């Protein structure tokens, strides 16, 4: 797969999928959660929302490191040749809920408006360090950002 085609496939996957598995770290133990996410067009940032009174928020603020897995599997045998999975790694911090970022998030997740706007929720920003793209089950490519 050419680099251009790979980037197009990555952008398409991040645009189409609504949920990701977020992995945070606490005392060298991984902790995972499902999150609704949105990526910027340049793929440098991924945003998601979390209540501040959660382990997830506490772990992210404490370590600042996270990984996010986004995939298009269908839980079918065809996934072994057709599914694509992406692992994004990077630094996470709380972001200001600017109008621009709220619009970006709500364009993809309009049904989460109350959740996003709640004073008890934080908008989190992952600055992506790299993407590891796995396709055709064992074709793995790393993209540094």
Image (spheres, rainbow, N blue to C red):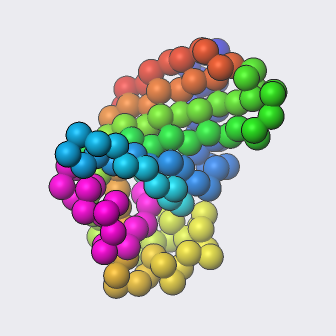
Q: In which quarter of the image is residue 94?
A: bottom left
**Residue 31 relative to residue 94: left or right:** right
Residue in the picture at 50% in, 58% down: 35
Residue in the picture at 62% in, 76% down: 111
Query: Any magenta on residue 113?
Result: no
Q: Which of 116 and 101 is in front in this view?
A: 116
Q: Is residue 85 in sight in this rendering?
A: yes
Residue 81 x %, y % = 75, 21
Above-or-below relation of 110 to 135: below
Residue 99 x %, y % = 41, 75
Q: Is residue 91 in sight in this rendering?
A: no
Considering the image in quadrants, where does the C terminus appear? top left
Q: In which quarter of the image is residue 91?
A: top left
**Residue 117 relative to residue 127: left or right:** right
Residue 83 x %, y % = 70, 30
Above-or-below relation of 30 to 54: above
Q: Nearer the viewer, residue 91 or 43?
A: 91
Q: In which quarter of the image is residue 124?
A: bottom left
Query: Any magenta on residue 57?
Result: yes
Residue in the picture at 56% in, 42% down: 70
Count of residue discs? 0
Considering the image in quadrants, where does the N terminus appear? top right
Residue in the picture at 80% in, 34% down: 76
Residue 64 x %, y % = 23, 49
**What is the span of residues highlighted in magenta in the rendered image?**
47-64
């Amino acid at each position: 797969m050419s680099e251009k085609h790979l980037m197009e496939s990555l952008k398409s996957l991040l645009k189409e999928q609504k949920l990701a598995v977020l992995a945070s770290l606490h005392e060298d133990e991984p902790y995972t959660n499902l999150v609704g996410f949105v990526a910027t067009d340049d793929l440098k940032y991924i945003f998601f929302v979390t209540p501040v009174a959660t382990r997830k928020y506490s772990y992210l603020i404490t370590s600042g490191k996270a990984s996010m897995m986004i995939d298009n599997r269908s839980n079918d045998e065809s996934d072994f040749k057709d599914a694509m999975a992406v692992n994004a790694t990077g630094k996470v911090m709380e972001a200001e809920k600017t109008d621009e970022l709220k619009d970006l998030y709500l364009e993809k997740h309009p049904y989460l408006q109350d959740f996003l706007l709640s004073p008890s929720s934080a908008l989190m920003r992952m600055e992506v360090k790299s993407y590891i793209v796995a396709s055709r089950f064992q074709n793995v490519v790393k993209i540094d950002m």
